[in-house]
C-alpha cells in the first residue's frame, strides 16, 4: 500500500507539471490537474489506511476465550 501511495505521488507530480506546461486554460491541462488532485487524494487515503492497519496489527490483541 505504501509503494502504491508513493507511485501515486510521483504520477500526481508528473500530471501537475504537465498541466502547468500545457496551461490551465487548455482542456488537457484541466484534465491533468484534475488527475493530479485525484491521485494525491488516493495516495493520501492509501497511506492513512496503511498506517491505520499497521497500528491495528501492532497492538497486542487479547482473546475473549483465552
Image (tube, helix red, strand yellow):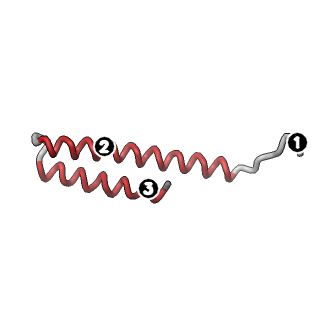
Residue 12 rendering spot, x and y as whole percentages: 30, 51
Q: Which one is closest to the eye, mark 2 or mark 3?
A: 3
Query: What residue lies at 33% left-to-right and 42% top-to-bottom?
Result: 38
| Mark 2, secondary structure of its residue | helix
Query: What residue lies at 18% left-to-right and 41% top-to-bottom?
Result: 30
Judged left or right of residue 36, residue 6 is: right
Query: In the orientation shown, which residue stands out farthest toward the right?
Result: 66
The numbered mark, 2 or 3, whose residue comes first in the sequence reads 3
Q: Which one is closest to the eye, mark 1 or mark 2?
A: 1
The residue singled out by tag 1 in the image is 65
The residue singled out by tag 3 in the image is 4
- Count of marks, rendered view: 3
The numbered mark, 3 or 1, whose residue comes first in the sequence reads 3
How far apart, in angstroms, are the residues tagged by discs 2 and 3? Answer: 16 Å
Q: Residues within 10 Å of mark 2 (few under 14, many from 20)?
A: some
CB within 8 Å, label 2 to label 3? no
The numbered mark, 1 or 2, whose residue comes first in the sequence reads 2
Query: What residue lies at 71% left-to-right and 49% top-to-bottom?
Result: 59
Query: What residue lies at 37% left-to-right and 53% top-to-bottom?
Result: 8
How far apart, in angstroms, are the residues tagged by discs 1 and 2? Answer: 47 Å
How far apart, in angstroms, are the residues tagged by discs 3 and 1? Answer: 38 Å
Residue 54 rendering spot, x and y as whole percentages: 61, 52
| Mark 3, secondary structure of its residue | helix
The residue singled out by tag 2 in the image is 37
Judged left or right of residue 65, residue 9 is: left
Query: In the displayed structure, would residue 3 be above or below residue 50?
Result: below
Amino acid at each position: 500500500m505504501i509503494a502504491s501511495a508513493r507511485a501515486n505521488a510521483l504520477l500526481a507530480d508528473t500530471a501537475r507539471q504537465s498541466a502547468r506546461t500545457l496551461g490551465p486554460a487548455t482542456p488537457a491541462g484541466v484534465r491533468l490537474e484534475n488527475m493530479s488532485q485525484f491521485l494525491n487524494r488516493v495516495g493520501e487515503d492509501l497511506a492513512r489506511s496503511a498506517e491505520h492497519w499497521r497500528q491495528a496489527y501492532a497492538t497486542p490483541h487479547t482473546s475473549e476465550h483465552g
